[in-house]
Image (cartoon, grey):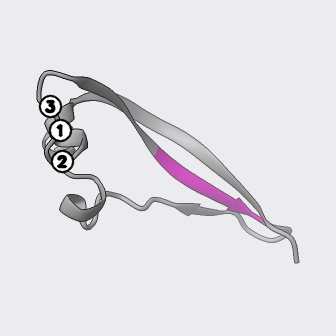
Amino acid sequence: MSYMIRPLKNGSCVIAGNHAFIGGNPTERYPYNLYLWLIKNQEEPILVDNGLKGLFREAYGVAHLLG
């Protein structure tokens, strides 16, 4: 069985450097994109949303922008 995995951008924002990187410069700004993932095969499609679980490990400081 073959699968196709496709990213679906569902949002974006700009975050301060201290929220993008641990020890980052708060005066610098960085784009931050949010994605869902569509997995398709011959049967039913699957939509995967990783969310922001493990925020401080994986996406430090972004929750206050999305909350």
Q: What secondary structure do most residues of the magenta stretch adopt?
A: strand
Give me the disc on residue 63.
2
Q: Which residues are magenta?
A: 35-40
Q: Residue 33 in magenta?
A: no
The kind of residue tagged 2 is Ala
The kind of residue tagged 1 is Gly
Residue found 42% across the figure and 62% down from its top? 50
- Counting other residues with Cα less than 10 Å from the Cα at mark 2, is it few (<14), some (14-19), or many (20 or more)? few
Where is mark 3, residue-wise?
A: 25
Question: Compared with residue 4, is residue 19 higher up or lower down, i.e. above or below?
Answer: above
Is the N terminus in the top left, top right, bottom left or bottom right quadrant?
A: bottom right
- Name the image quarter holding residue 3: bottom right
Element on which disc 2 rests? helix
Where residue 43 appears, as percent x and y from the top left, is 80, 71
Give the mark, 1 or 2, whose residue is nearer the N terminus: 1
Spatial distance from mark 1 to mark 2, Cα to Cα?
17 Å
Q: Residue 39 in magenta?
A: yes
Give me the disc on residue 58.
none
The kind of residue tagged 3 is Asn
Spatial distance from mark 1 to mark 3, Cα to Cα?
4 Å
Where residue 55 appears, as percent x and y from the top left, is 22, 60
Residue toward you, 53 or 25: 25
Q: Nearer the viewer, mark 2 or mark 3?
A: 3
Element on which disc 3 rests? loop
Farthest-out residue, bottom: 1
Q: Is residue 28 left or right of residue 47?
A: left
Spatial distance from mark 2 to mark 3, Cα to Cα?
18 Å
Is the C terminus in the top left, top right, bottom left or bottom right quadrant?
A: top left
Where is mark 1, residue-wise?
A: 24
Residue found 47% across the figure and 38% down from its top? 10
Residue found 14% across the figure and 31% down from its top? 25
Mark 1 and mark 3 in contact? Answer it, CB < 8 Å: yes
